[in-house]
Amino acid sequence: PSFNLYDYHTYDDQMAYIKSIAQQYSYVHLESLGKSVEGRDIQYLKIGYPSNRPKNILFIDAGIHAREWIAPATAICIIDRLVTNPDYTSLLYDIDIYVVPNVNPDGYEYSRTSDRMWRKNRSGPRQGCYGVDLNRNFAFKWGYSGVSRDPCSETYAGSSALSEVEAQHLAKILDANNNTIKAYVTLHSYGEDLIYPWGYAIRTYPSDVAELKKLAHEAAEAIHAVNGTRYSVGNSADELYPASGASDDYSKSIGIKFVYTFELSPTSSDDNFYGYGFQFPKEFIQPTCEETFPGILTIAKAVQDTN
Ligand code: 0X9
Ligand code: ZN
């Protein structure tokens, strides 16, 4: 009742909010992926009406990187939009939408209370340093590019593929549903980019890249129509940089069709890396959610069309 969608919240408050949504709506269920390394429960929502046949799934996660606060805030706002608007009832009869608002609760809390620029999880220490970059820890081309073997680095890939419990939990649910998850969207910040695999090497694309690109452009167009924000669409390695072991490449490698990383606002052109890029004022949560939501709906409709 008192939850403000347009503010940044503690992890406990985020979880209390999604729990309250599950209690309020019969077609929403609260589940757990498992615990983080510090023992926080990584909870998520399954949104969709029951059906006799297996339903295809749009899987959304956020918060893999601790400091990217706009991502969990947007995920939670997307949940609110989906459940409070009756326009989406028929969509939710056709497909299920799973939303994990915060994959890395330990890192998020550390970013809130100790080091605003924290990116990794909080495992360790190793050589006196904490954390693995969860978006370098997945089991596809692990350690191949854009990673560090130094535990003190921001992009430390971990001691082995899936060494981290948070990555294990996410991989497990993706693996278990790889035939029915038709789209995987992972919310990050920042840059205003909508990027697709493969991310591990430049100019290296899945065989269905034309379809990925087409849907990405449709989603970017839907985003643009809201406030005029122009997302750059492209291959993640070409558009940003090569980096392997990320959750998007992993999802694509296990056969999920439409795989996207959203780098939410702000854009990188008008700020400084250690400035408000990650420290995006709460006033921007609402416009970011309002424009991201139709981008997500575009992908949800593509999942619906796979029926
Ligand atoms: O480097 C990352 O993990 C992502 N950018 S961020 O600024 N949020 O850290 C981009 C990941 C893109 N995907 C792959 N390289 N596979
Ligand atoms: Zn990120």
Image (tube, grey):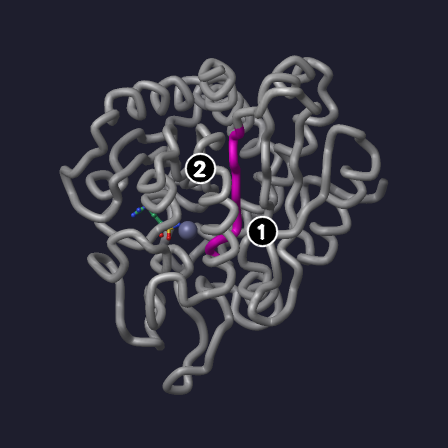
Q: Which amino acid type is shown beneath numbered disc 2? A: Asn
Q: Is residue 59 magenta?
A: yes
Residue in the picture at 24% in, 54% down: 141
Is the residue marked by circle 2 packed among few (<14), some (14-19), or many (20+) residues within 10 Å? many
Q: Position of residue 40 (x, y in %)?
A: 65, 64
Boundaries of the magenta span: 57-65
SS of the residue at dot 1? loop
- Tell me if mark 1 has few (under 14), some (14-19) or many (20+) residues whose alpha carbon lies within 10 angstroms of its own: many
Label 1 vs 2, first from the N-terminus: 1
Q: CA distance from mark 1 to mark 2?
A: 21 Å
Q: Residue lying at the far bottom in this picture: please name it.
A: 128
How many badges with numbers are in the image?
2
Residue 198: where, in percent of width, then height? 25, 40
Return the mark for residue 178: 2
Instruction: Write down the residue under mark 1.
Output: 102
The reply, left or right, for residue 207 in relation to residue 282 is: left
Q: Residue at x 70, y 23 (%)?
A: 49
What is the quadrant of the N terminus in the image? top right
Vertical placement of residue 79 versus 129, above or below: above
* Secondary structure at numbered mark 2: loop
Mark 2 residue CB less than 8 A from any atom of ligand 1: no
| In-front residue for pair 4/90 | 90
Magenta stretch: dominant secondary structure: strand
Question: Residue 225: where, in percent of width, then height?
Answer: 47, 16
